[in-house]
Amino acid sequence: MSDLAAGPSGSHEPVQVGLCLAALSPWGLAKAAATAAETGAGVVDLPVDRCFELVDADRLADPAHHREVAAVLRRAGVRAGCVSNSRDTQLALGPHGPHTDPVLPGSAADKRAYGLRAALGTVALAAGVGAPLARLMLGVPDLGRWLSWWGSEVSWRDNVSAWLEAAAPALALARESGVQVVVEPHPKQVVYDPASARALLAAAPEVGLCLDVANIAAVGHDPVLAARGWGDRLAAVHAKDLQVWRHPEDPHGAGWSRYGPGPPIRFRALGCGELPWAETVATLLDEEYRGVVYVEHEDALLPTEQGIATSVSVLRALLPTGTPQGRTW
């Protein structure tokens, strides 16, 4: 596994600050990568979904396109620590109804095939640009499995089994290519909380975790506790803050959404929400995480560059820049 993907190692190498490029996609790959370099984020999470248009989604498996993308990143002075896909790969497991028609209209079989091709292409492009990780969001076949049903043995583990079957070709390609597939907790995914993450990781030993504590907190879990106990399965971390609307009326303002049956939430730049990021970062350090923490800008109240700069500044203030000396008096 590449150093970028390494988890606990006992090393005192500084944790790296990275940047997810999705929020910068309107600017194109060259400017997005250059902006990452200007913020001091030398590592990027590169989304290859068709809607972002940062790469040519029809050429994900094309080695010539891999060289083109790698050259753009190299000129900007950044490298890809992760190549990701969430919109297109979602169709591998669905839902396959009108929810995903904006990605691809058609039958469930058409959508499933499209999602699986996107997953394979994402892994191929990760290998082609030298990224150690491919983050695949394959969707979820049945959200009704959140619930228990009288007289039925249906459970969330059936979704885990479906994920393993759908992911098998991408996992095989990843093994051949020296890339690790990682999953990120999200309520539209089979992995959506700590328990479902543990279930999938136990069933798929080669898969790593991209931890997003804001996503986990959005469905009601403690973000600090969620940062504990992953060991070397923790391959990457996403950083954003969270606000929860606790009033009985509908929320006011931009950016509010629902992550399930709980109250509305919206994501903010670090330090602008309610998550205990100082304690979360300290927990990651205590857990000896030595990978990349990627700033993920999803703040609807701040301009993109301001939101990114705010989050990077907060994160840098919390991360050691070298070996701590400890108490010296």
Image (cartoon, rainbow, N blue to C red):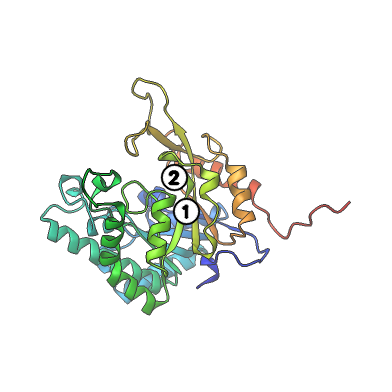
Q: Position of residue 63 (x, y in %)?
A: 33, 76
Q: Position of residue 235 (x, y in %)?
A: 49, 62
Residue type indicated by callout 1? Leu
Query: In the shown orientation, is residue 298 left or right of residue 164?
Result: right
Q: Which one is nearer the viewer's eye here, 118 or 164?
A: 164
Residue type indicated by callout 2? Ile
> Is residue 60 visible from the viewing direction of this image?
no
* Farthest residue, direction bottom: 176
The relative height of residue 137 versus residue 298 in the rendered view (above or below) is: below
The relative height of residue 232 versus residue 240 in the rendered view (above or below) is: below
Which residue is tagged 2?
Answer: 216
Task: Say if mark 2 contacts mark 1, CB within 8 Å.
Answer: yes
Q: Earlier in the sequence, mark 2 or mark 1?
A: 1
Which residue is tagged 1?
Answer: 211
Q: Quadrant of residue 323?
A: bottom right
Q: Position of residue 72 (x, y in %)?
A: 43, 65
Q: CA distance from mark 2 to mark 1?
A: 9 Å
Residue found at x 50% / y 41%: 222
